[in-house]
Image: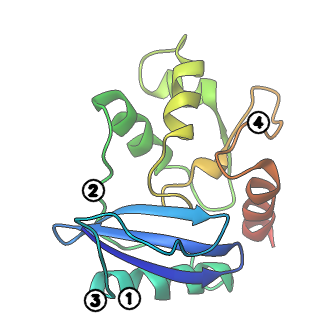
């Protein structure tokens, strides 16, 4: 696995690539860690460089869709939720219940919320576009302030 750290409007982001596909984008609240556990290699690759460019364009308001090969790791249900979440257009939101219904599991809104919370490719897989049943901002792995920031960015 290759790992690269970049600065963003939100702080330090950790980008992860494996087998020529992006498998992780996480916000590092404390910046870049001092040591990387093996077998990770901290290096910039063409894919991680392209990911950084596309994220910078997104934060600048110049990109509405990402064009990157994705390989998120998770259960079959999580992957189904993430695939459905990826269909939410830029600047729009869906509720956890709407995603559950789209998956043919209308009573699985809480499970959808759990899958969103485990999203390994933040921002690019837009779990920030998923809201509570009444439209309220609920749950986000990196805090509601970050979720609110991303949604506002997409409204401007």
Q: Few, some or many C-alpha atoms within 10 Å of disc 3 (few <14, some 14-19, many ≥20)?
A: few
Query: In this view of the protein, which residue sits in the foreground, 36 or 56?
Result: 36
> Distance between the Cα atoms at labels 1 and 2?
17 Å
Contact between marks 1 and 3 (CB within 8 A): the answer is yes
Task: Indicate the position of residue 58 as horizontal and vertical percent values.
Answer: 60, 78
> Distance between the Cα atoms at labels 2 and 4?
26 Å
Of pointers 1 and 4, the one earlier in the residue sequence: 1
The residue at the far front in this view is 35
Residue identifier under label 4: 138
- Location of residue 145 by image quarter: bottom right
Left of 151 or right of it: where is 119?
A: left
Q: What sort of colour scheme is used for the picture?
A: rainbow
Of pointers 2 and 3, the one earlier in the residue sequence: 3
Q: Few, some or many C-alpha atoms within 10 Å of disc 2 (few <14, some 14-19, many ≥20)?
A: some
Identify which residue is drawn at 42% across, 25% down: 103
Residue identifier under label 2: 71
> Distance between the Cα atoms at labels 1 and 3?
5 Å
Query: In this view of the protein, which residue sits in the foreground, 62 or 146?
Result: 146
Any part of residue 64 in sight: no
Residue identifier under label 3: 46
Which element type, helix, strand or loop, lies under badge 2? Answer: loop
Left of 84 or right of it: where is 95?
A: right
Task: Indicate the position of residue 152 as horizontal and vertical percent values.
Answer: 81, 64
Identify which residue is drawn at 35% across, 28% down: 77
Residue identifier under label 1: 49
């Amino acid at each position: 696995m290759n790992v690269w750290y970049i600065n963003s409007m939100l702080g330090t982001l950790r980008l992860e690539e494996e087998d020529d596909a992006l498998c992780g984008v996480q916000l590092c609240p404390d910046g870049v860690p001092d040591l990387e556990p093996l077998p990770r290699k901290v290096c910039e690759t063409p894919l991680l460089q392209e990911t950084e460019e596309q994220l910078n364009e997104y934060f600048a308001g110049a990109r509405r869709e990402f064009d990157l090969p994705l390989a998120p790791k998770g259960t079959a249900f999580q992957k189904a939720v993430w695939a459905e979440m990826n269909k939410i257009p830029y600047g729009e939101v869906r509720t956890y219940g709407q995603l559950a219904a789209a998956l043919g599991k209308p009573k699985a809104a809480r499970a959808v919320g759990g899958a969103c919370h485990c999203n390994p490719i933040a921002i690019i897989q837009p779990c920030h576009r998923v809201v509570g049943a009444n439209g309220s901002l609920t749950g986000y792995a990196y805090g509601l302030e970050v979720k609110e920031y991303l949604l506002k960015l997409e409204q401007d």
